[in-house]
Image: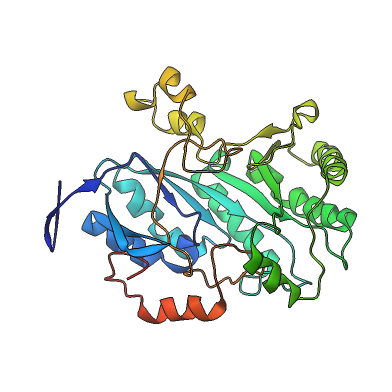
Amino acid sequence: MFDTPAGETKAIAPLVISASRATDIPAFHSTWLMHRLNQGYCVRANPFNRKQKSFISFSQCKVIVFWSKNPKPLLPYLDAISARGIQYYFQYTINDYEKEGLEPNVPQLGDRIETFIRLSEKIGREKVIWRFDPVMRLDCVSLDEILDRIDGIGERISPYTTKLVFSFVDILNYAKVTKRIKKYSVGAQELNSNERLDFAQKLTAANAAWKNALELATCAEIDNLSHLGIRRNACIDDALIRTMCPGDAKHDAKKSAARKDTGQRKACGCAPSKDIGAYNTCLHLCAYCYANHSEGAVRNTFDKLSIESESLLS
């Protein structure tokens, strides 16, 4: 049980918080997060039924995994989070679809790279994981051009991370995404198995030439690319978490080896965590994002959101 302003309430107290697969909390909700940490809990509404809510206590939290395309607004708060005894690392997505306008509200590429480097120098390169997600085949841009863009980013940031995680766009399963991307007239399409293999081979070659060759991994992909040295990733990474929390018996290696988040896709290798984000709360408004229904839905949510809100879906 947990004390809230409304009285004693049943709450879960996870060891690992995901912040968040559903939205960019560092970019848009840093002050809200810090207020919730000060309050000791937050509320997560079921995205399909807002009346169903779960209380999440931070009392046992050991690690926060941040997912972001622009963590710059969170940087001033990192010392305060550390002072609470909470460890953290970042899944930092740096794509390059600037010319196509597919990520309309992310900062310019150069600014994102500068923030990546600054963050890495502050917390350590092993805690800032580069994601290029998703990889898309576009009518106006060849896969080789996408590889050239990745190569350009890798040349600059490879000394400041240890891993590159990538995944291929999955459009067909999301009708709203298909409809939204059509408005951009870029002809985004999924890659077939031969294209995925060719891309992985060329990426492996590019990586080998960078200043610091990175570990390569895919996110929730069915392809087995182990013969190229590319493994299937665990974005909520029990191995990394154990190194960050060496004194925590609850992350014993033998126990952790069998841990898997059953709430994620079959090909996902993530360990269990509790996500505190919400759909329709990310103003990046990326064309391919499954977590936003529409720009209007996002702006409507923001109009109602307050720093005092227990949940991002109040």
Question: In the visual, does 50 lie left or right of 283?
Answer: left
Q: x, y percentage for residue 258?
A: 47, 24
Tell which of 124 and 162 is nearer to you: 162
Question: In the visual, does 311 lie left or right of 64?
Answer: left
Q: x, y percentage for residue 206?
A: 84, 42
The reply to whether residue 48 is visible in this rendering is yes
The reply to whether residue 248 is visible in this rendering is no
Tell which of 24 and 2 is nearer to you: 2
The colour style of the image is rainbow
Residue depicted at 56% across the width and 43% down the height: 265
Q: x, y percentage for residue 26?
A: 47, 61
Give the quadrant of the C terminus: bottom left
Question: In the visual, does 92 lie left or right of 20?
Answer: right
Tally the numbered discs: 0
Question: In the visual, does 310 lie left or right of 22?
Answer: left
Q: x, y percentage for residue 281?
A: 47, 69
Q: Residue furthest top?
A: 254
Residue depicted at 41% across the width and 66% down the height: 29
Name the image quarter holding residue 96. bottom right
Q: Is residue 95 above or below residue 108?
A: above
Residue depicted at 67% across the width and 53% down the height: 133
